[in-house]
Image: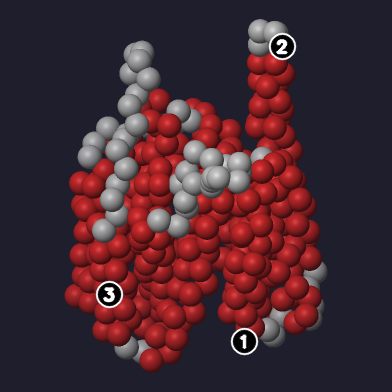
Amino acid sequence: MSEPNGFEARPKLWTRDFVAVCFSSFFLFMTFYILAVTLPIFVTDTLHGGQSRIGPVMTVFVVAGLVFRPLAGKWLDEINRRTIVLIALGLFFVCSGLYMLVDSYAWLLALRLVHGVSFGIGATAIGAIAMDLVPAARKGEGVGYYSLFMSLAMVGGPAIGLMIAETGSNPLLFGTCFALALCGLVCGLSVRIPARLPRKPGPAPTGWRRFIEPAAVPIGLTGAVLAFSYGAITTFLSVYAKSLNLSAYASVFFMVFALMIILSRPFTGKMYDRSGPHPLVYPGVVLFALGMMGLGGAHSLPMFLAMGAVLGLGYGALFPSFQTIAIQSAEPHRSGLATGTFFLLFDAGYGIGSSVLGMVSARTGYHTMYIIGGIVVACSGVMYYVLHHRRTASRSAAMTTTAPHA
């Protein structure tokens, strides 16, 4: 449809349903990040567990989510999506309230397992529905804004969690999580979920292709390399800041990080839709790699915070670009599977990176760990060229060669 002046009308992005699904994701991830920073304190102070008991509490949640992400992607493309959202977010809500009743370490582990399952399914379902609500012509912009809500939760969740932890009130902590999970459930159920696109004629996928979208694997592997280094920021930044005598400014670092994502998001999304991912990915890799290396060499507050800004710009360009590529690489009727595949690999890279770089820091120190992380990020640029850029360029050239000429 064209407007009277001859210009093509832009399809609407900020619909009621898109806003609702963004807030559902925000509340889901707020709950996740609040628990991520406060459960270690709960384990040691309330359950009187040692430091060795903190890791399994985090690991069992992540592993459960990883296992169920590809299953969720498959179910989203085959089963009624509203049913999946209701079950996943409803279970996430119930689990968030059950923390108030935990009085043993074994019960906590069992609850974290079920909570991780609900999170893996819920996050995949909400993300896939959000992508279906975004017009094709504004896909890059829409994915960027959707991921912005996750970035805000990444900053707001730890800040709120640590403030509540200062009060020492577990009822307040878990009551807050319970309320946030309820908000996520209400927002998710208020979304008018678009009809699932019909599958193309032909044989149905068999074997592992029922759970994994092959077209999303190349960019998912590239995203996993980014996540490998990103894990060093979220996991070790607070203790690194303490080693620099800057622990009071760790939260400020994340605020600067998030602020740069927010400020850049309107421009990066529109640039993606106008020019494609390459003008965003390569500068993003350079910025993120330099930010990691600069963080490793930081010895002053200005340098510390400046690297937070550089990293925020890099991450703000890379993450939504990779996610959009994953979705656009698959057939429309397999968008849910593509979303699950991308996050399966991204989360795996995040978990592996946190563990491996933790061992690196124990041997070499945090400065060297962040420098190594920057080198790893640079490798993601090479992977992007080999696994995506070169392949798409070859495909485009082949299509141009075989296209009929007038």
The answer to whether one can see residue 358 in this image is yes
Q: Looking at the image, which residue is at 38% across and 91% down? A: 167
Number of callouts in the render? 3
Report the amino acid beneath label 1: Ala
Query: Which residue bears the numbered disc 2?
Result: 401
Q: Looking at the image, which residue is at 30% across and 62% down? A: 187
Q: At which x and y percent is residue 208?
A: 39, 26
Of the residues under marks 1 and 2, which one precedes in the sequence? 1
CA neighbours of label 1 inside 10 A, class few (<14), some (14 to 19), many (20+) = few
Which residue lies most toward the front here? Answer: 4
Quadrant location, the C terminus: top right
Of the residues under marks 3 and 2, which one precedes in the sequence? 3
Q: Is residue 363 above or below residue 174?
A: above
Q: Nearer the viewer, mark 1 or mark 2?
A: 2
Q: At which x and y percent is residue 334?
A: 40, 32
Q: Quadrant of residue 184?
A: bottom left
* Label placed on residue 179: 3
* Secondary structure category for the residue under label 2: helix
Residue 243 versus residue 21: which sits nearer the camera?
21
Q: Give the CA distance from mark 1 to mark 3.
A: 29 Å
Residue 231 versus residue 321: which sits nearer the camera?
321
Q: Nearer the viewer, mark 1 or mark 3?
A: 3
Of the residues under marks 1 and 3, which one precedes in the sequence? 3
Query: Which residue bears the numbered disc 1?
Result: 248
Q: At which x and y percent is residue 336?
A: 39, 39
